[in-house]
């Protein structure tokens, strides 16, 4: 009994949870020893997963960690106390398959829409132990853009994140890692939320209220980042089209000037002919007049069209800027 008390004290386990778990202390110590002895293998596996993820387009950064040994024991005891059937027969032989977050990895991306191609790349590289879970906040749109099988769940504390259990077999033993994919704003908020909320203040109403506002600000920041990306793409498309129109206008001008030059040559040849009748001379005069009119109208068009295009581009930029200001104002209101 004394050894049990020392054990639960060392691992910060309360007496009621320990009593409900009904698990042998020696079995837990055996798991802990094996876990400690295989730390190098776990680190190598985590590094392998992380290196592959970092190479995926759209992934900004990757973090990983190996579960704390004492945290592993607390989790096993807690799951057993809760009557989790998966943990009923846990032992040193199977704990690496039962506990799926021995390796924890986070892949961070900048924009919300990056999740779709990242999800495709993850599924192409590894098998998943179960359908990924897309966590959203209450009030979020439940229709995901991901076509592959997945579940959508509303997270109690407002976390937005995609969770995967990916598996690989770099050696004889299968390795499972828990992968979380989220935006850089959600990562920042979740880290602060976890730091302030756990382990002693998860139910404090004042703290929960402030963190809820913080969550909304992070969500608004995600929306503004996505909007800004779309605005940038729109500006680049407009500039590209203006460049194309400028090139087309230059080509048209060159063709026009060439036509005028050829027409002038023809007129000179006509003028050089002798024995011209009055009617013939009248046609030449009329042709000259038509050419002069074309030249004048062409000059006007070449000066007006670019200015119109510039005005249209400026109008679109002003509209986009107004929309951005409106989004920023909404963000400011949410933070009050």
Image (cartoon, rainbow, N blue to C red):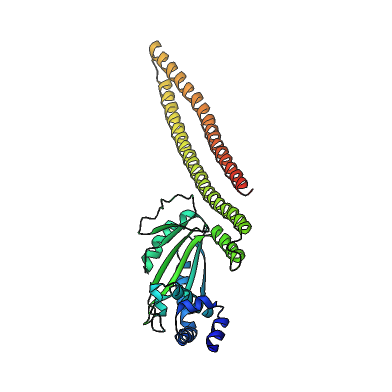
Position above or below: 54 against 111: below
Image coords of residue 2 (percent x, y): 55, 88
Q: Position of residue 239 (x, y in %)?
A: 51, 43
21 or 299, which is in the foreground?
21
The correct choice, above or below, for 80 with respect to 158 in the image is: below
* Residue that protrudes farthest toward the top in the picture: 278
Say which quarter of the image contains residue 187: bottom right
The residue depicted at 43 percent of the width and 20 percent of the height is 271
* Residue 172, x across and y down, in percent: 36, 82
Q: Is residue 212 above or below residue 131?
A: above
As rendered, which of 301 and 119 lies closer to the eye?
A: 119
Image-based side of 296 in relation to 146, left or right: right
Residue nearest the viewer, comparing 163 with 230: 163
Residue 123 visible in the shown view: yes
Answer whether residue 47 is visible to the viewer in this image. Answer: no
The image position of residue 35, as x and y in percent, is 47, 83
Please determine whether, in this image, residue 10 is positioned above or below residue 275: below
């Amino acid at each position: 009994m004394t050894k049990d008390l020392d054990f639960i004290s060392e691992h910060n386990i309360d007496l009621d949870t320990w009593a409900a778990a009904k698990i042998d202390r020696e079995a837990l110590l055996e798991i802990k020893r094996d876990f400690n002895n295989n730390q190098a293998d776990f680190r190598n596996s985590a590094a392998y997963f992380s290196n592959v993820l970092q190479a995926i387009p759209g992934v900004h950064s990757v973090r990983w960690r190996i579960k704390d040994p004492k945290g592993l024991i607390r989790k096993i005891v807690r799951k057993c106390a809760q009557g989790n059937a998966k943990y009923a027969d846990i032992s040193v032989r199977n704990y690496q398959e039962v506990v799926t977050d021995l390796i924890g990895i986070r892949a961070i991306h900048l924009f919300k829409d990056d999740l779709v191609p990242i999800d495709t790349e993850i599924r192409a590289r590894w098998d998943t132990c179960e359908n990924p879970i897309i966590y959203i906040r209450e009030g979020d749109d439940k229709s995901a853009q991901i076509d592959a099988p997945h579940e959508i769940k509303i997270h109690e504390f407002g976390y937005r994140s995609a969770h995967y259990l990916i598996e690989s077999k770099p050696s004889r033993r299968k390795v499972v890692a828990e992968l979380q994919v989220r935006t850089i704003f959600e990562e920042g908020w979740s880290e602060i939320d976890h730091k302030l909320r756990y382990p002693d203040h998860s139910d404090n109403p004042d703290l929960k209220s402030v963190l809820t506002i913080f969550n909304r600000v992070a969500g608004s920041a995600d929306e503004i980042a996505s909007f800004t990306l779309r605005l940038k793409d729109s500006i680049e498309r407009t500039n590209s089209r203006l460049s194309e129109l400028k090139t087309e206008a230059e080509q048209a001008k060159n063709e026009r000037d060439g036509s005028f030059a050829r027409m002038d040559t023809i007129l000179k040849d006509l003028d050089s002919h002798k024995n011209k009748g009055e009617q013939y001379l009248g046609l030449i005069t009329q042709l000259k007049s038509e050419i002069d009119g074309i030249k004048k109208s062409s000059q006007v068009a070449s000066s007006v069209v670019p200015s119109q295009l510039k005005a249209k581009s400026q109008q679109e930029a002003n509209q986009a800027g107004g929309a951005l200001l409106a989004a920023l104002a909404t963000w400011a209101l949410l933070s009050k």
